[in-house]
Image: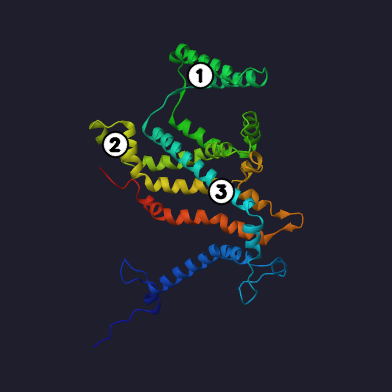
Amino acid sequence: MTRPDRPSLWRRLFEPKDLGSLAPGTRVLTYAVLLGWSFVVLFPLYWLLITSFKLPVQVNDGPDYLPFIDFAPSGHAWHYVFVELGNDTLRPYFNSVVIAFTSTLLAVLFGAFAAYALVRIQYRVKLGLIVGFLVILAAVVVATAGFGLPWQLSLAVGAALFLLLVVTLGPRLRRAVGNEDIQFWIISNRILPPVVAVLPIYIMFQQLRLLDTHAALILTYMAVNLPIAVWILRDFFAGIPIDLEESAQIDGASKLRILFTIVLPLAKPGLAATFLLVLILAWNEYLLALFLSTADAQTMPLLVAAQNATRGPQWWYMSVLIVIMIAPVVAMTVLLQRYIARGLLIGAVKG
């Protein structure tokens, strides 16, 4: 009898037994890569955590990695941040929570409305009306800032002129912009560096006496992050089968009812992913907060940057502030993880 050929070592290590499993060698390589990448991602967080328990002299002496072995942990930095600073830490933390979460909710809400409208409604906006609106807006600004007219009067006159322009010249205009042009214009607002617009925004809120207030930062953060929300949610709404909406419309459902009862529940994974991304952008915003706030509306990024004093960066205090700063974002990521994973299946449901 001839003995059956035994598979080679290479085949035993790297050829799976079936399509639903990994070969032993492939499994080892996969876990090695995942563990290596996890180390790369988690080590900076570990480094921040152990630095927050070091004394200044221990930080300046060089890198130590193992508490109770390389160095003796100390709560000096935590005591300074929460006890000696006290309200100077809690107030920026509270400001960041209120400003970031409120602006994110508003950006996602208005972004969802705009994205759904761009996906389901075909627009033909007259180009002449857009130019006329910009000219009238510039005239209102000049009349208010240059000639000292009350802004209520200038705004009322401008609105009346624009309404007259729509009624008289609107039907005669031919050239128009469509949905693709509107989408490009929306995302182009995010491409513009914030530093270009921060000075006009500063002057505007200065005239409105809203500098160093929650309202100024919430409105600015919402406006800056709104294009990102619209751009992301547009793809999620486009992936939802239109058959579901047409069936509901036949049954007499309005556009708003279809949006709130059918579209938004199906787009929940997309909303969660967009909310998390916009929250991170708002939570870490520094430039706008630097110009629009001083003390009352100061946020955590400004407090962290303030630890770079005349004696150099105080890494032990920075580490404490960064640890408590990233905690809400990590918590939101854990809470929204299952919705983000389900986002891969968006649009797979058919009516």
Q: CA distance from mark 2 to mark 3?
A: 41 Å
Residue 30 horizontal/vertical position (percent):
44, 68
Mark 1 vs mark 3, foreground winner is 3
Which residue position is annotated with label 1? 128
Asked whether, in this view, residue 122 is left or right of residue 128, the answer is left
Q: Nearer the viewer, residue 36 or 269?
A: 269
Name which residue type carries label 3: Phe
Report the residue at 48% width, 70% height from top: 32
Mark 1 vs mark 2, foreground winner is 2
Residue 341 horizontal/vertical position (percent):
39, 54
**Which residue, as the protein is rendered here, is positioned at the far top?**
168
Question: Which quarter shows the N terminus?
Answer: bottom left
Residue neighbourhood size for the residue with mark 3, other residues' Cα within 10 Å, grouped as few (<14), some (14–19), many (≥20): some
Residue neighbourhood size for the residue with mark 2, other residues' Cα within 10 Å, grouped as few (<14), some (14–19), many (≥20): many
**Mark number for residue 94?**
3
Report the residue at 77% width, 54% height from top: 310
